[in-house]
Image (spheres, helix red, strand yellow):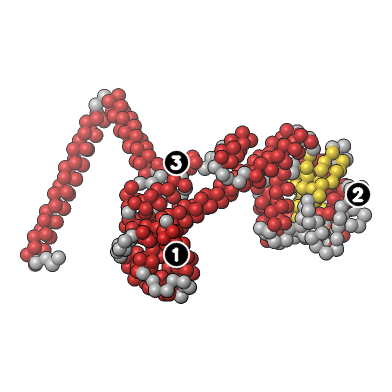
Amino acid sequence: MRLTRNMRLLLALSVVLTLLGIAGAAVGLAGSLAEVWARLRSGPAPIFYGLLLFLAAVSVLGGWLIWRLLMPSRRRSGRKEIEAPITRDALEQRISTGRVEGIDVSAAERELGELARRRDAGRLFLCVFGQISTGKSSLIRSLAPDAAVTTGVTGGTTREIGHYRWCTPGGDEIILADVPGTAAPGSEAETAALEEAVRAHVVIYTCDGDLSGEQYQELTMLAALDKPLVLALNKSDRYSAGEIDLLRERLQQRLDEAGADEAAVVVVSARSGGDGVADLAAAIQRLVERSPEALDALRDAAVFTIVARRLDAAATERRRERSAELVKSYTRKAVVGAVAAVSPGTDILIQGYLGTALVKEMCGLYDVPVRGIDTDRLLRLSQSYVGRSLPILLAVAGNALKAFPGVGTIAGGLTHAVAYGLIFDALGRGLAEALDEGGELRPAAAARKFRENLGEDLRARTIRMAKLVLEEKQTGRDR
Ligand SMILES: Nc1nc2c(ncn2[C@@H]2O[C@H](COP(=O)(O)OP(=O)(O)O)[C@@H](O)[C@H]2O)c(=O)[nH]1
Ligand SMILES: [Mg+2]
């Protein structure tokens, strides 16, 4: 808006007047404040100090209120971070409800079964962990020479987990677990080895020099299990005394960095007459001298954590399956509706009953509260995109159908049925992805996923949808 010169002058004048007014008011206020202050000071002391106290209390209260107003969400999320420890009862409860919901709870059950078996046997378990060829099997053989352990020149001779009985110098019977050597992070071997470490009371991490990045990561994961840990530097026969001192210092430092500052470094050689093996045995002895209950509690907590993680993974898997089934059933419904329609129009049914029902069911599956306005917004956003892309969609569908054997001349209705199917398929999958990621229904995010899915792999999806449409047409005719 353009202002005339006169208007500007008027505006400037009013600004000056306002400023003058404010300045005058400030001077007046200061004057009366000073007067009040002087009168209070010369008045009785209890009134003066009482007023000061009252003002202080009012400002504290005001500050607290403002802080509460500005900080509520952070405080709430902060409290959420403190998780209650996982208990066996809670896990068993989850297993029985999970079973009813069709979740595959077998892995969790197996793990709890193994825990019970080990508890009943009343034995202490020690897991020798480390990368391939660091000398895990050789170390076990030096500790327990009578036990049959396979060792090899080529790495990775220990494919399965082997258990060997060993008596500590103090007379405690321990089961030594020889696990597959780890090489690749996230590999099957590493996972199996880590799980065995989780099931053990004590862990020995074996290395034969300074730690690589991968080894450091493994050490960090083991430290996070929060159980007694020893870092064994094996193959000490390959180093001079000076090198060993340096390595020992360095490894101790890495242990601290990995969050295992209570763990000790023990230098050994499994080969040349077993140098340092007695030190290793003594270090283990010190660790197992804690009360069996304390050792069990640490082990149980770690096992419960992996059982809970397995249940989470199984629940996620089941939800994915169910969401795929849901998408399939809605896609079919959309196709059926389109095939049955006498004269299909270009309007898309997405905002109608089917779309709403799909959103509602999908949100129910993901345990996400669904509000009518969010549903409407998602369907409106999706619909407006469909409106723009429908001609392309119909063209692609028409072309794919032409190439489809047995269709011949295609009625317009079939092409529309394919388009409806594609739309519901993309909407359902996009919605599931968005709910999976966001944990709440965010219409814009879900609509974006819908667009991505609708455009992706269009030809191949069209052909699949065409088969579905023809099937429906066939069953419709048979009926
Ligand atoms: N020089 C030397 N070689 C060792 C020592 N311990 C094991 N080795 C060799 O390292 C290779 C791998 O040992 P192995 O126990 O099979 O390792 P694992 O894969 O960790 O079980 C074998 O050739 C062993 O002879 C040691 O203390 N010193
Ligand atoms: Mg081995």
Tell me the kind of residue under disc 3.
Arg
Secondary structure under badge 2? loop
Visible residue check, residue 263: no
Residue behind label 2 places its C-beta within 8 angstroms of ligand 1 = no
* Dot 1 alpha-carbon crowd within 10 angstroms: few under 14, some 14 to 19, many 20 or more: some
Camera-near label (2 vs 1) is: 1
Whether label 3 touches label 1, CB < 8 Å: no
Q: Which residue is mark 3?
A: 76
First along the sequence among labels 3 and 2: 3
Q: Position of residue 4 (x, y in %)?
A: 9, 67
Camera-near label (3 vs 1) is: 1
Q: How many marks?
A: 3
Q: Which residue is mark 1?
A: 470
Q: Position of residue 28 (x, y in %)?
A: 16, 42
CA distance separating discs 3 and 2: 57 Å
Q: Which residue is mark 2?
A: 145
Q: Residue at x 79, y 39 (%)?
A: 124
Q: Is residue 373 left or right of residue 408?
A: left
